Image (cartoon, rainbow, N blue to C red):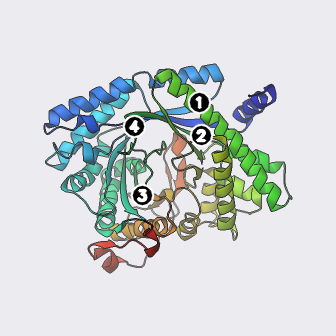
Amino acid sequence: MINIFEVNETNKMIQDDNLDVRTITMGISLLDCIDTDLETVNRKVYDKITSCAKDLVKVGKEIEKDFNIPIVNKRISVTPIAIVGGSACKKPSDFVTLAKTMDEAAKSVGVNLIGGYSALVSKGMTKADEMLIRSIPEALTSTERVCSSVNLASTKTGINMDGVRLMGEILKELSEVSGDRDSVDCMKLVVFCNAPDDNPFMAGAFHGVTEADVVINVGVSGPGVVKRALEQVRGENFEILCETIKKTAFKVTRVGQLVAREASKRLGYPFGIVDLSLAPTPAVGDSVADILCEIGLEYAGAPGTTAALAMLNDQVKKGGVMASSYVGGLSGAFIPVSEDQGMINAAKVGAITLEKLEAMTCVCSVGLDMIAIPGDTKATTISGIIADEMALGMVNQKTTACRLIPVAGKDVGETVEFGGLFGYAPIMPVNKFSCDDFIKREGRIPAPIHSFKN
């Protein structure tokens, strides 16, 4: 039972500490849309999305009003389009038509974003996979709401280095073709190791082939709530610190659980998971970096940062799993640079570097996220950064990702404005030494020995 004290406490978190449900994401399977005729596939995809999600935005707004809980985004994720379009698409431009169909459907039902323009290539690429990947620059620059992801590695399969090399080239191309808009479309593309099938957060959301036909996943976020709670225990020992984070994460997850159950009931589709991810925004007081500072660091990136982040991430997960039997997705702490004012401040003063962020991804829930780098960074260097991040995920049996933004025409010392939830970012320096010969090798890096568990 929820008592009046808990209701008042939740209201205070919403009003004062930026607690919100970041997204209700409807996952939709498009496997029944597969056909050999491209026009038929496009029609089926549009009809399936608009039919299933016709009430998603309306129900989200009703829940906001009824429970006084902000729901920032309503989104859709679909089956990886490389699978859906594989039989009908004969060239990259054919896949672009599917991206445009996704965009039209998203606009029709009023959602903010739609994810799943994706390929899963951790062990190798089919012809369809490669065509979709090569179509990404055109697909993302010709649509508004479509997000793309590519899974390049896993603990069970190793790292597809051919895919890593190709994605460096694709990201570079995407940066250039959207260069007149500060390469903004790079924000809509992410590469993964061990990508989860039920992640509700963009740009990496897709609806895995093991999922039900339609499910409701919810992502809830509250960095400000955690920071406020830690302010009350300044100077206390680690046991009290950890208990405070865990209890706060429990309360935040319960809000997500409530919204997920209610959305599931009203929409008539099963509840999938709650993703408790401390996803920051540029708003003051809504920062993961500020939590690290409250724990005792001068800036995010100072010595001790990785240890503090590991503790934070673990306690968030422990609190979350006590609050819901279906915690999933990524669940933990996000460390995007442009979306977190504390991270932006740390980057400006030089407290945090790309290499330190890479170390932090060993213990957080995502990876190198929303990081602006010089536009003249070579494709092979981008691939090398991606390969490092894939290796961290593969060896540590966790999800890692890269969402890098090579900003055309800009260099270290400049900033780039993305606006809204995406914020702004300083251009961060990249190691100038070459990895060309490493990236040019063909094939894949084998899975680690500890992957053999069956």
Q: What residue type is labelled 4?
A: Ala
Q: How far apart are marks 2 and 3 (CA)?
A: 21 Å
Label 4, secondary structure: give it: loop
Badge number at residue 192 = 3
Label 3, secondary structure: give it: strand
Mark yes or no: residue 142 visible.
yes
| Quadrant for the C terminus in the image | bottom left
Label 2, secondary structure: give it: strand
Q: Residue 43: give x, y in percent of width and height.
A: 22, 29
Seen from this angle, which residue lies furthest right? Answer: 235
Q: Which-is-in-front pick, marks 4 and 1?
A: 4
Camera-nearest residue between 315 and 187: 315
Badge number at residue 259 = 1
Q: How far apart are marks 1 and 3 (CA)?
A: 28 Å
Badge number at residue 212 = 4
Is 128 left or right of 180, judged from the image as shown? left
